[in-house]
Amino acid sequence: MSTRRILAMQDVIKRTPVELNHPKKQVSEYYGSNVFGIDAMREFLSEEAFNSIQNSMNQGTIVERKMADQVAACMKAWAQSKGVTHYTHWFQPLTGTTAEKHDGFFEPIGGGRAIERFSGSQLVQQEPDASSFPNGGVRSTFEARGYTAWDPTSPAFIWGNTLCIPTIFVSYTGEALDFKTPLLKSLGALDKAATEVCQFFDKNVTKVIGTLGWEQEYFLIDAALYNIRYDLQQTGRTLFGHAPAKGQQLEDHYWGSIPERVLAFMKDFEYESHLLGIPVRTRHNEVAPAQFECAPVFEEINIAVDHNQLLMDVMEKVAMRHNFRVLLHEKPYAGVNGSGKHNNWSLATNTGKNLLSPGKTPKTNLQFLTFFINTVKAVYEHADLMRACIASANNDHRLGANEAPPAIMSVFLGDSLNKILDEIEKSVGDKKLSPEEKTALKLSIGKIPDILLDNTDRNRTSPFAFTGNKFEFRAVGSSANCAGAMTVLNAIVAEQLQNFIKDVEGLMSSKKLEREDAIFQVLKRYITESKKIRFEGNGYGDEWKAEAKKRGLNNIATTPGALEFFISKKSIGLFENLGILNHREQEARYEIYLETYTKKIQIESRIMADMVDNQIIPAALNYQKVLVDNVSGLKNILSAADFKKASETQISLIREISERITIIKNASDSMTNERKKANNLDSAKKQAHAYCDKVKPFFDTIRYNVDKLENIVDDATWPLPKYREMLYLR
Ligand code: ADP
Ligand code: MG
């Protein structure tokens, strides 16, 4: 074993669970204590300032500058009472992670003294130099300023010694440079359209919010092993590694007993999350060895997104205390499952109703069906955009890999709802329903809640499934910012609901129909039109690929292909009409995503060549030398006949090593060459396609041969921690 690997394994063997010294209290006693939430606001703000913030949170009104000064002073007082010394505008640039620049509260006042100060203007706006964040050419360098602006709808929080203020991030000319800005706009559009539709059924509804409950999957690895796997460090995934004898085939990991060391880590990050008001509640082992999941209680989408971004950061930091590293990559290991982040999505009204939960009366069930069918129709209309919004170099490894939803977009409804939709389609005609027909239809709709109650069918292979009272977008990647997927889903449903209102009102006036009859007729038409997107079978099977092709559904395997749909006429129109992103912003995003893709593959390709040259080939040559020495030794002491027999296997190993080294080296050199060619192409689009089609294919050849060498070469010589070492945690 290479010295580094021996030392790392010695560390791993000695590990014990890290002792926690959390207060032995119920969660409710400390939950949210590091959040400037309602309780802290009540305690620290004047009534006037408190009301101003509450209005801003609930109605989106602007907090006046005078109030902002007061809020800032109180936030500072609250934070100082907890030992905080710095503050930061916390935002979500298009890198996918979060950004923060800490500034001290203190200000020198001359005479060698200083005071702590935090003003309203510092709270409300900052001007980071935005030229170092991805901007897709939106901001030319002479206008390098961008600014962050306070989002009062997501509460400030304390992480470490820093007060973090959630903000949006826009260019000086007002274009969005982050995930939060379009998300907030999409939520506004959704609220408006959904509230208007609710008015058809219930006049008390004046606000609709989107809700999100994510499920975060991740892997853990011992830090000592991580530290000597350069591929994991630099790309988040293992570029090499032979599958272990025992992977996930015994299916003994899912919901299995959680290892002690892991449990200590989970308790620790859950504790930190609860201080931050992140409602994580569920923890369990996932399917692959060393893979786990955590899930919170759902929240309003903007807050849920912030909480997920924050949680990923908290997990990574807490993991270090436990000598673990968290792998949030979608596919850290080949041959075992990858990680996703299911986005459970629904709509809730100010009257406390979940719009995707069937009600007790036929009327509320018609409301449920309205939102349900419109969502299906929206996904049908924008299936390719849904595919685009989950595309990334990482997620390409997972989608369609017989463990994760396929790259074909479809919707799973479950048996009972399919039947109801079929019934509506059959019984509603172009003419007004007779009173008897209507009663019969309403009766069957009235049965929905009972049917759903015992409807336990679950289809794990669908990218977008209805699961009783919410839709579950399963194709989102584990490292993704949920805002990307949520912005698209909110937008397409908002647009669809707008169309629904137009269609219903159109029928009411053209055919002189009562509203309810018009609703039935429009829903019936949507059911018929969007049938193609409904699929109940096995999404992992090859039959589905063939069937989807027949239906004309796209199966877009790679990110560069999928990203095209961000800038299709249809998508640009969608975002522009709803005022979420203009075409420049959308095109800039497209460029950024392409560049990110290219850079990721470029880094993988470079580190691969690096490891091949510096670690793998030298290790293989060392072992080959042992064999060669042995064979020459045998030749000296054995008769020709005995030598032939004794050396045969070794000579074939020597040959195999040479052959594989040659293949690896040639592939690696050709790959480097293709990289050079790709780098010289003149557009982000061409580069991304070249990296995808010309550079990436070499990965398979190289990896295949390296993994064969791993099997041949003496374990003592092999430089990299093996899958069997990395995947098993005590
Ligand atoms: P499963 O693994 O079977 O999908 P989990 O219990 O792990 O179920 O996750 C369910 C997720 O759905 C949780 O994150 C939960 O908060 C979320 N959820 C439940 N109801 C809603 C809702 N109305 N809106 C959004 N998310 C919801
Ligand atoms: Mg789920």
Image (tube, rainbow, N blue to C red):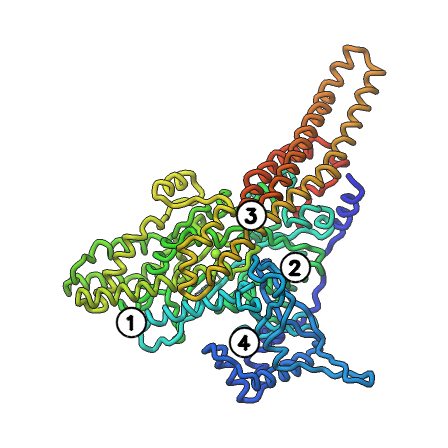
Neighbourhood count class around disc 4 (C-alpha, 10 Å): few under 14, some 14–19, many 20 upward: many
Asked which secondary structure carries label 1, the reply is loop
Point out the tag, 2 or 4, that comes first from the N-terminus: 4
Asked which secondary structure carries label 3, the reply is loop
Instruction: Determine which residue is flagged by label 2.
Output: 316
Report the mark closest to the observer, 3 or 1. 3
Neighbourhood count class around disc 2 (C-alpha, 10 Å): few under 14, some 14–19, many 20 upward: some
Q: CA distance from mark 2 to mark 4?
A: 27 Å
Residue at screen point 63% across, 47% down? 237
For the N terminus, the quadrant is top right
- 352 left or right, relative to 624: left
- Picture layout, residue 381 above or below residue 515: above
Q: Provide residue 385's location: percent of width, then percent of height.
A: 44, 53
Asked which secondary structure carries label 2, the reply is helix
Point out the tag, 3 or 2, that comes first from the N-terminus: 2
Instruction: Determine which residue is flagged by label 1.
Output: 200
- Picture layout, residue 221 above or below residue 506: above
Instruction: Determine which residue is flagged by label 3.
Output: 683
